Image (spheres, helix red, strand yellow):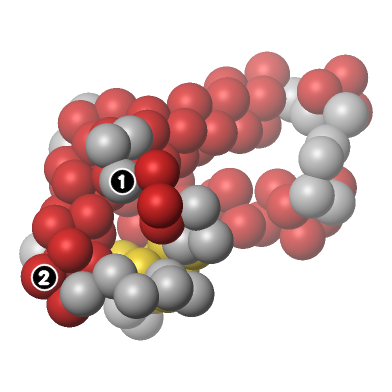
Amino acid sequence: MTGYRVVLQVFDEAGAHERQQAEQRFCRALESALGDADLVAPVYRQYQRLIQTYGEDPDPLALSDAERELLQAWQSAEAAALSAALGPQRYMGDAQFEIHLEPGPSY
């Protein structure tokens, strides 16, 4: 059980099959970058807390070492997932991936 799902919002003529493939590539790359599918939801929850506390672009000097590591891990994983999902699909430039977390424990 991974605790999350990804929905690709595309603002052009991409078909359902293309969206589904992009979502799958995004998930696989995100899970690979973080080390395990079960880490996505808890890491994303902590990332959201950091953003709520420090804003969209937090000053790394304002973060603890653990917070900085988590921020960097998430940002790197998300960048890898975006590249994997949209790399060959450049026409999906207006695409946005939404991560929906299932209710679960708070870490």
Q: Amino acid at mark 1?
A: Gln
**Disc 2 marks which residue?**
17
Q: Quadrant of residue 22?
A: bottom left
Residue 18 can be seen in this image: yes
Mark closer to the chain start, 2 or 1: 2
Neighbour tally class for label 1: few under 14, some 14-19, many 20 plus, Cα within 10 Å: some
The residue located at (75%, 25%) in the rendering is 64
**Disc 1 marks which residue?**
89
Residue 107 can be seen in this image: no
Taking 101 as reference, is 37 above or below it?
Answer: above
Which quadrant of the rendered structure holds the C terminus?
A: bottom left
Task: Find residue 48 and report its horizontal and vertical position in percent.
Answer: 62, 57
Element under disc 2: helix
The residue located at (81%, 40%) in the rendering is 57
Q: Pick the residue in front: 94 or 58.
A: 94
Q: CA distance from mark 2 to mark 1?
A: 13 Å
Taking 40 as reference, is 79 above or below it?
Answer: above
Q: Amino acid at mark 2?
A: His
Task: Find residue 99 and report its horizontal and vertical position in percent.
Answer: 41, 66
